[in-house]
Amino acid sequence: MLERAAERFGLKPERLAGESAYGSAEMLHWLVDEQKIEPHVPVIDNSERQDGTFSRSEFSYDPEADTYICPEGKTLTTSGRIVNEGTNRLYLGSTFDCGPCPLKERCCPNTPARRITRSIYEHAREVTRALAGTPAFERSRQGRKRIEMLFAHIKRILKMGRLRLRAPCGAQDEILLAATAQNLRKLAKLVLPTGPQMTQEA
């Protein structure tokens, strides 16, 4: 949609507000590095562990050396190996460091050394994380909620849980009718007086 809008109308947004479905690493890379658009979306992050062992966020990353530093101060290096279908780079600790480490039971109790993966699009993810909580991000979030409330109203109040007309033209007509009904309901509330006012006038 963004590409079609830029191609047909010469319009390109400075920022994009969306739900977490837009927070994948590939999407953020496309927005930040290729399109130069600020993504005001939550970042999808599954690196937090729930078993009590150290998560990736407890390791510090050194961008100059391209290494991770564990809580004990040891280094995890990478050979450049790409895993997870070509989306993550693998970093490994040394068995000589991890074996006698006093924090091994909290770090890698079931493996000889700690393994960490880092997205090849981590730069875009870091840019997106830095935008979270800013005034612009909060304005986008509030604006997105107002728009999503309209769709929720159409689904729940106007009972439009699914489209019944076929083909793009049919779907467009159905959405237009639903939006028209929604606007008429809002207009009626603005134009017609409330109950107490009508009673006093009578």
Image (cartoon, helix red, strand yellow):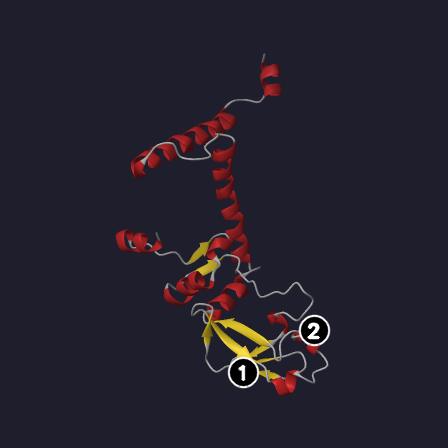
**Mark 2 is on which residue type?**
Arg
Q: Which type of secondary structure does the marked residue at label 2 adopt? A: helix
Quarter of the C terminus within the rendering: top right
Instruction: Tell me if 186 is positioned left or right of 107 in this view.
Output: left
Which residue is most to the right? 102
Residue 2: x %, y % from top left: 35, 54
Q: Residue at x 51, y 54 (%)?
A: 20
> Residue 106 shows which numbered tag?
2
Precedes in sequence: disc 1 or disc 2: 1
Of residue 109 and residue 64, the one placed in the foreground of this image is 109
User: What's the CA distance linking mark 1 and mark 2?
Assistant: 20 Å
Q: Which residue is mark 1?
A: 77
Of all residues shown, which one is farthest toward the top? Answer: 202
The amino acid type found where label 1 is placed reads Thr
Q: Residue 48 falls in which quadrant of the image?
A: bottom right
Closer to us: 43 or 140:
43
The circle on residue 154 is none
Which sits in the foreground, 159 or 112? Answer: 112
The 10 Å Cα crowd at callout 2, few under 14, some 14 to 19, many 20 or more, is few
Point out residue 155 in the picture as x, y percentages from the top left corner. 48, 35
* Residue at the outermost bottom position: 96
Locate residue 127, reporting x and y percent: 49, 67
Where disc 1 sits, the SS reads loop
Instruction: Name the residue rendered at 68%, 81% in the picture.
Output: 72
Q: Position of residue 159 (x, y in %)?
A: 48, 30
Above or below residue 175? Residue 91 is below
